[in-house]
Amino acid sequence: MAKRSIFDTINKKFRRTSVGKMFSGYQQLREANYISSHFSTYLEPVLAVDDALRESVYKIRHNVYCDELAFEPVKESGLETDEFDAYSRHCMIRHIGTQQMAGTVRAVRPLQEDQLLPIEKYCRSSITRNDLSPDNFKRHEVCEISRLAVPKYFRRRRSDDFDGSATGAINPVTYSETELRCFPFIAVGLYFAAAASALEFGVKHAYVMMEPRLARSMGYVGIKFQQIGPVVDYHGKRAPYYINRPLLEGSLKPGFASMLNEIRLSLREQIPAMPEEREEYLRQFIKD
């Protein structure tokens, strides 16, 4: 135990040095490139193009937001929905090996003047950067990324004890070590899916209410959200953030830029399956 403590102390001191920080940064870069290159081998983006897939979205959200976190009341239907779903695009990440859905997110995308973003309805006063307020832009140019949810069994590490499905642990027999290394990046994949969806549909300005620590985690892969207001109490401590296409594409690390492009190409193939996204409709908004 004493030897371990001494080693840990030396290791911590080394990481604080300029050489240690450089080494740590190199390790992070290697890990980022490793994950981005393997992500599409095990996980794939899915647009909720029909009622069955949208029901899967609502079930995952109910499991996370109602059953687990108690942010919303439990519903008898087992589906978590709200008024914004009527004009949202829902994306999921599917684990290829088991065909299980590993998470969901939506891009709330208003097109009519009376359609608000959730941030406008519930947290408008939290936005202090007036120059980046959604009010400054046309309705079809804005969206909000929200309702990100990852089931518990895709958030657990291999080091956890496997006590069966009731605990939500990952079965180490079912998932490989490489897959488990990819799972913490499911949230990144979901944000990329929402971003790709927005880019395909001509959206220019995106908003999200999230915890500052999540924003910092997104910065690790090069997603540089701009904080446009203070932290407020909204389903926990969250702050309003803004991002646009130049901010997204200009700061991504190469491996993750490639990952975003792969997700975007995959979603592009799925768009024709959505009746409301036919070519004549999209032509109003999409500009290459």
Image: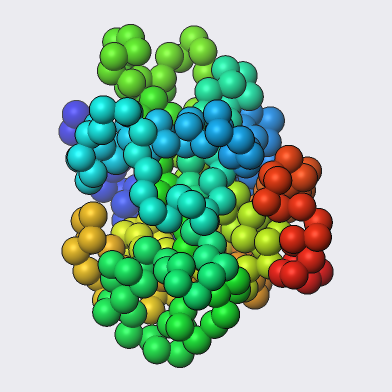
Residue 176 percent location from the top left of the image: 55, 19
Residue at 36 percent across and 72 percent down: it is 120
Residue 230 percent location from the top left of the image: 27, 76
Looking at the rendered image, the quarter that the N terminus falls into is top left
- Residue 137 sits in which quadrant? bottom right
- Relative height, residue 159 to residue 266 (above, below): above
- Relative height, residue 169 to residue 134 (above, below): above
Answer left or right for 282 relative to 24.
right
- Residue 139 sits in which quadrant? bottom right
The one of 116 and 61 positioned closer to us in this rendering: 116
The one of 176 and 41 positioned closer to us in this rendering: 41
- Relative height, residue 197 to residue 31 (above, below): below
Residue located farthest toward the bottom when viewing the structure as drawn: 131
Answer left or right for 109 relative to 274.
left
Can residue 216 be seen here?
A: no
The one of 25 and 227 positioned closer to us in this rendering: 227
Residue at 50 percent across and 86 percent down: it is 136
Residue at 35 percent across and 39 percent down: it is 80
Residue 143 percent location from the top left of the image: 52, 66
Figure disc tally: 0
Answer left or right for 57 relative to 235.
right
Can residue 278 be seen here?
A: yes
The one of 86 and 38 positioned closer to us in this rendering: 86
Residue at 76 percent across and 52 percent down: it is 278
Residue 150 percent location from the top left of the image: 41, 37
Looking at the rendered image, the quarter that the C terminus falls into is bottom right
- Relative height, residue 230 to residue 70 (above, below): below
Colour basis: rainbow
